[in-house]
Image: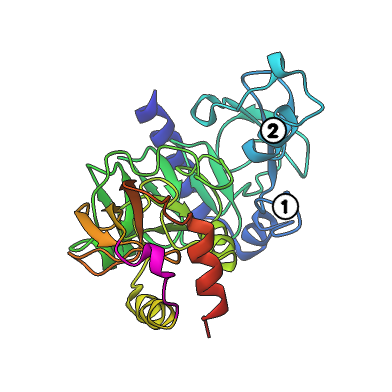
Amino acid sequence: MESETMASLSSQSSAISELSDEDVSALENGSGNYGCSHYRRRCKIRAPCCNEIFDCRHCHNEAKNSMETDPLDQHDLPRHEVEQVICSLCGTEQDVQQYCMSCGVCMGKYFCTKCKFFDDDTSKNQFHCDECGICRIGGKENFFHCNKCECCYSKSMEDGHQCVERAMHHNCPVCFEFLFDSMKAITVLRCGHTIHDECMEEMMQHFRYSCPICSKSIGDMSSAWAKLDKVIASTPMPEIYLNKMVWILCNDCGANSNVRFHVMAHKCLSCKSYNTRQIQGEPTAPCASRVAETMSCHTG
């Protein structure tokens, strides 16, 4: 079936190369004027799951997973199973193909036969990743596919990223949107876990600097730890607590330390991080919010 589709497309391309300038102009009719908030394209798709017509799979998923939809009827569109498209210019319904069989218009300057995907905005540098099984943006030459993480990463990370099995095959730990095929920008943290850029920025606005999944620091916190050193040095504990010792676990390096209790924070004796938690001993260690409050008062 795929070889037949490719042969058909090859035949279409050959025929188009022989067209006059006037005919080529007709193929470009309506370019950029059709589509939805997600994509510029000159066709709609018939959803194979519910047999309804939508501009794209995201439009379908938003409509079928809205609060107004009965939970029993909620579902996502299986993109690879789309078989029919409707030309936006002439309204002809037809098998998935790049050029309308009726009016001949190009329904998407970028077209993927595997994903059944159309897009007139080629400035995104779309490409299909066979390992991911979906189309991505940014230019194939700028990305590599990590077989352990099972997703595409920027080539700048190829020799230094922390592998986490199926790193993007889960929901964002903040907003809970599925990350693997999300249209939003995604950040890979130092620990290897993934999160939306905008969700990480929101975390940092609330002075949360650790991974929501594993609690490791999301960046170089050395300057923040230096500020905490000064805060703690200028905040002596009451005499009753001067000799109190507690055991802590470092979220960054995993080491256990027996340290002197302080109401503000506890410093790992191994890596000098303050990203720690009390695991034994009294009195109770400060909560993360206390440290965050301290950092908010001494940032800038």
Residue that appears at 35% across and 29% down: 3
Residue nearest the viewer, comparing 15 with 45? 45
Q: CA distance from mark 2 to mark 1?
A: 12 Å
Q: Magenta stretch?
A: 235-243
Reading the image, the residue beneath label 2 is 60
Looking at the rendered structure, the kind of residue marked 2 is His
Q: Is residue 239 magenta?
A: yes
Q: Quadrant of residue 45?
A: top right
Badge 1 is on which residue? 37
Q: Amino acid at mark 1?
A: Ser
Counting from the top left corner in percent of width and height, residue 273 is at 29, 67
287 in relation to 96, above or below: below
Give the mark nearer the N terminus: 2 vs 1. Answer: 1
Badge 1: how crowded within 10 Å, few (<14), some, or many (20+)? Answer: few
Depth check, front residue: 145 or 226? 226
Q: Residue at x 36, y 73 (%)?
A: 221
Q: In this rendering, is residue 134 above or below 154?
A: above
